[in-house]
Structures are given as C-alpha cells and as structure tokens.
Image (cartoon, rainbow, N blue to C red):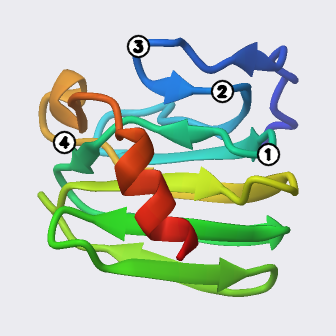
Amino acid sequence: MNIEPSAPTTKGPSERFAGDVWVDQIASPHESGQRMVVALVRFAPGARTAWHSHARGQYLRVTSGVGRFGTRDGRIVEVRAGQTIYTPPGEDHFHSASEDAFMEHIAMIENADNPSETTVWKEHVTAAECRRASS
C-alpha cells in the first residue's frame, strides 16, 4: 500500500484548451495491466477543451459548478455538481464551464493499449459552438 506523492498542479496547454484550465493528476498506472487515469480538472469561467475523443470512453464527475458537454451532432448536456456523465469510446466531445462560473470535474479514463492513443485531440471548439451550448 502506498500514499501517492502529490504532483504539482499544471496549466492545461493552449493546444488542448481555450481559457484557463488547471489539472491535478490523482492516479495513473503503476504496474503492467493497469489502465486507470484520474485527474481533477478546474475550468475558469468560459474555459473549454478542444474537440477530442477517448479510446475507451470517459467518466466525468462534476464536483462544483455546472459543466456543459457537447457532441458533434450539436447535443449539449448540462451536468451539475454531484452528477456523472459518460462519453462512449470514440465519441467526439468537449467540456466547458459556463461564462459566469468556475466548473470542476474529476476525469476518469482507461489508457488504450498504446497510451499515446488514449485521447485523440482535435481542433478547437468555435465560439459559435460554445454559444450553442449557452442557448
């Protein structure tokens, strides 16, 4: 049994996020056969991810604020603190905070067989796509 060392908070890179986003790594694989990756992610008002998908899907537990999660077909789901949303493998989506409040979620994914293929990052979400999320 191990108490995990604390990792410093990192700023989300601009090629993957618009606005200010901070990431705290909670768990990552230690041994062969382990796949679980968990992070606490904080979004400043109006911040969002770029479009992306996950090889094995993703669970997101909103811990504060209201998250907006969008898919390519224009569907927008608002998830409140205490709720969990699941995104299936390969589904393009984005996560965002509202324009007037912070949002925080715990992201849970499993690595792909090749960890570099776990998340496929794509283009940034446009302002029009975000406005659609707000309407």
Q: Nearer the viewer, mark 2 or mark 3?
A: 2
Answer above or below: position of 38 versus 2: below
Label 4 environment density (alpha carbons within 10 Å; few <14, some 14–19, many ≥20): some
Is label 3 or label 1 in front? 1
Residue at image position (68%, 87%) is: 83
10 Å neighbourhood of mark 2: few (<14), some, or many (≥20)? Answer: some
**In this view of the protein, which residue sits in the foreground, 100 or 87?**
100
Residue found 85% across the figure and 23% down from its top: 5
Along the horizontal axis of the image, is 120 left or right of 107? left
Residue identified by numbered label 2: 19
Pinpoint residue 54: horizontal percent, then vertical percent. 24, 50
- Given residues 74 and 118, the one toward you in this image is 74
From the image, tell me which residue sits under label 3. 15
Quadrant of the rendered structure where residue 87 is? bottom left
Q: Are marks 2 and 1 in contact (CB under 8 Å)?
A: yes
Residue at numbered disc 4: 112
Is residue 59 visible in the rendered structure shown here?
A: no
The disc, 4 or 1, on the residue closer to the chain's N-terminal end is 1
